Image (cartoon, helix red, strand yellow):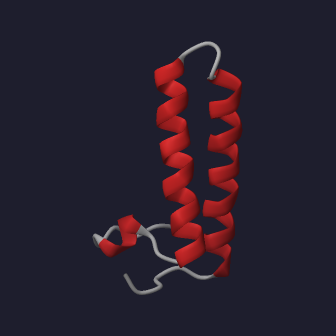
Amino acid sequence: MQRNIDRKGRLMRGGAAIVCGMAGLFLFHFNFWVSIALFASAAFLAFEAVRGWCALRACGVRTKF
């Protein structure tokens, strides 16, 4: 799990984690299971942002950021 994204990619993933977390909070009262999935996605994106590691890039997929 070596770093494979730069600062811009980390910021993008951190922003996406915040958006997913906020969407999970908003949808919590409407659909519990969708909010759980969004919280899990937010947690994984935050992990990627903190570590500077992208799971897709580690699998060989070329990403833009």
Residue 65 visible within the image: no
Residue at point 70%, 50% (across, down): 18
Residue at point 59%, 82% (across, down): 6
Whole-percent x, y for residue 53 in the image? 47, 75
Quadrant assignment for the C terminus: bottom right
Please tell me in which quadrant of the rendered image residue 60 appears. bottom left
Residue 46 visible within the image: yes
Q: Is residue 57 left or right of residue 37?
A: left
Q: In this view, does 52 lie to the left or right of 61?
A: right
Residue at point 66%, 61% (across, down): 14
Q: Which of 2 and 4 is in front in this view?
A: 2
Q: In this view, does 62 lie to the left or right of 17?
A: left
Please tell me in which quadrant of the rendered image residue 22 appears. top right
Compared with residue 48, is residue 35 higher up or lower down, i.e. above or below?
A: above
Compared with residue 50, is residue 32 higher up or lower down, i.e. above or below?
A: above
Whole-percent x, y for residue 24 in the image? 62, 32
Compared with residue 34, is residue 13 higher up or lower down, i.e. above or below?
A: below
Residue at point 60%, 61% (across, down): 13
Q: Is residue 11 left or right of residue 31?
A: right
Whole-percent x, y for residue 17 in the image? 63, 52
Count of numbered tags? 0
Q: Which residue lies furthest to the bottom in this view?
A: 2
Quadrant assignment for the N terminus: bottom left
Q: Which residue lies furthest to the top in this view?
A: 30
Whole-percent x, y for residue 26 in the image? 71, 26
